[in-house]
Image (tube, grey):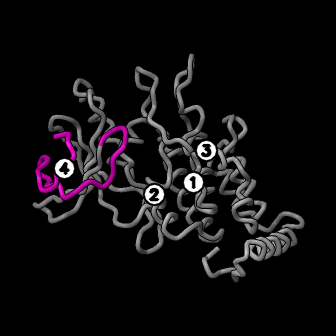
């Protein structure tokens, strides 16, 4: 069963209720395990891997061992004309949709969410067998009703972490994937911890600007969209998103360290005040006459 339009059909023991998302690697279905009266997300894995069942089962077992508040629980793996991974269903709205509907968030909110994302990336990267998420982007981050953020569609990304495929290809999202994840002539696609750091930086930039990260204007400084953004956060974003991996942060712990240093730089508070004035001037020039805080900036 690989077609859409599967509502109310069955997939294994699960009744399909709808499609949660679709990408180059297949669909994620909202399904109900009627025996447990439990909703679940059923992820369709790559086609053409029927002969690699041993490897897939070992990797699924590995995924089931992952335990972190920001990760969905993996329930099971099954085969029915293809491989499907069943995960916890996480209710909420994607970060992408959240920003589209409400606009960019303020720096305090962005820092709060950034800390959560860094915590889960640190958990993945520092395991005995490090896991590279490889697909960190707003569509894969769920904003839950309690205001927390969680990663979804984790199964496909985790399977990628076990090494390159024979073709050297790698699924990626323009605007968020690191340059090394995009295959070029004579070079294979690859990813490591610094690739996730790049995607984190792009995601953080999207939080505080709302700008399309795949557009050419995304190379503008984040302060062009949000003049009140602190110089410290702007520098963190710039270092995360450096084109060359060696010029980025080399570990998540380094980003955490810099996020916790807010205001400790000499002249930091003065610069914050200057940026506050710049923001007021910017809004006045735009003719908005808006009082800061009305949109949570």
Label 3, residues with CA under 10 Å away: few <14, some 14-19, many ≥20: many
Mark 1: secondary structure: helix
- Sequence-first disc among 2 and 4: 4
In the picture, the disc for residue 150 is: none
Q: Earlier in the sequence, mark 3 or mark 2?
A: 2
Q: Is residue 109 above or below residue 46?
A: below
In the image, 177 versus 79, the foreground residue is 177
Q: Which of these two is toward me, 280 or 80?
A: 280
Whether residues under marks 1 and 4 lie with C-beta atoms below 8 angstroms apart, the answer is no
Q: Is the C-beta separation of discs 2 and 1 under 8 Å? A: yes
The magenta segment: 1-26
| Disc 2 + disc 4, Cβ < 8 Å | no
Q: Earlier in the sequence, mark 2 or mark 1?
A: 2
Q: Count residues near mark 4 (Cα–Cα under 10 Å), then give few for <14, some for 14-19, many for 20+.
A: few
Of labels 1 and 3, earlier in sequence is 3
Q: Looking at the image, which residue is at 22% across and 62% down?
A: 39
Residue 198: which numbered mark, if any? Answer: 3
- Spatial separation of the CA atoms under disc 3 and disc 2: 16 Å
Q: Residue at x 42, y 32 (%)?
A: 162
Mark 1, other Cα within 10 Å: few <14 / some 14–19 / many ≥20: many
Tag on residue 141?
2
Q: Residues within 10 Å of mark 2 (few under 14, many from 20)?
A: many
Q: Is 200 or 78 nearer to us in this picture? A: 200
Q: Which mark, by number, is residue 203?
A: 1
Rendered image: mark on residue 5: 4
Look at the picture and state if 5 lies above or below 1.
below
Q: In the displayed structure, does residue 45 sit left or right of residue 283?
A: left
Q: Nearer the viewer, mark 1 or mark 4?
A: 4
| Along the viewing direction, whichever of 126 and 4 lies nearer the viewer | 4
């Amino acid at each position: 069963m690989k077609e859409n339009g599967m509502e109310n059909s069955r997939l294994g023991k699960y009744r399909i209720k709808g499609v949660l998302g679709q990408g180059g690697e297949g669909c994620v279905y909202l399904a109900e395990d009627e025996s447990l009266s439990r909703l679940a997300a059923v992820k369709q894995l790559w086609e053409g891997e029927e002969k690699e069942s041993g490897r897939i089962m070992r990797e699924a077992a590995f995924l089931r061992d992952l335990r972190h508040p920001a990760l969905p629980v993996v329930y099971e793996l099954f085969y029915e004309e293809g491989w499907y991974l069943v995960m916890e269903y996480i209710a909420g709205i994607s970060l992408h949709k959240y920003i589209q509907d409400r606009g960019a968030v303020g720096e305090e909110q962005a820092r709060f969410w950034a800390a959560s994302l860094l915590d889960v990336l640190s958990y993945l990267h520092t395991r005995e067998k490090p896991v590279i998420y490889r697909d960190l982007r707003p569509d894969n981050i769920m904003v839950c009703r309690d205001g927390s953020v969680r990663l979804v569609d984790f199964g496909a990304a985790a399977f990628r972490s076990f090494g390159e495929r024979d073709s050297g290809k790698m699924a990626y999202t323009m605007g968020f994937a690191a340059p090394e994840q995009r295959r070029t002539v004579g070079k294979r696609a690859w990813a490591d911890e610094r690739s996730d750091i790049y995607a984190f930086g792009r995601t953080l930039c999207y939080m505080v600007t709302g700008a399309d990260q795949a557009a050419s204007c995304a190379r503008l400084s984040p302060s062009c969209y949000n003049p009140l953004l602190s110089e410290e956060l702007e520098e963190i974003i710039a270092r995360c998103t450096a084109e060359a991996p060696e010029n980025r942060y080399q570990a998540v712990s380094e980003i955490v360290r810099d996020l916790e240093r807010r205001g400790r730089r000499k002249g930091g508070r003065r610069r914050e005040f200057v940026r506050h004035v710049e923001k007021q001037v910017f809004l006045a020039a735009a003719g908005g006459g808006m009082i800061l805080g009305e949109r949570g900036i």
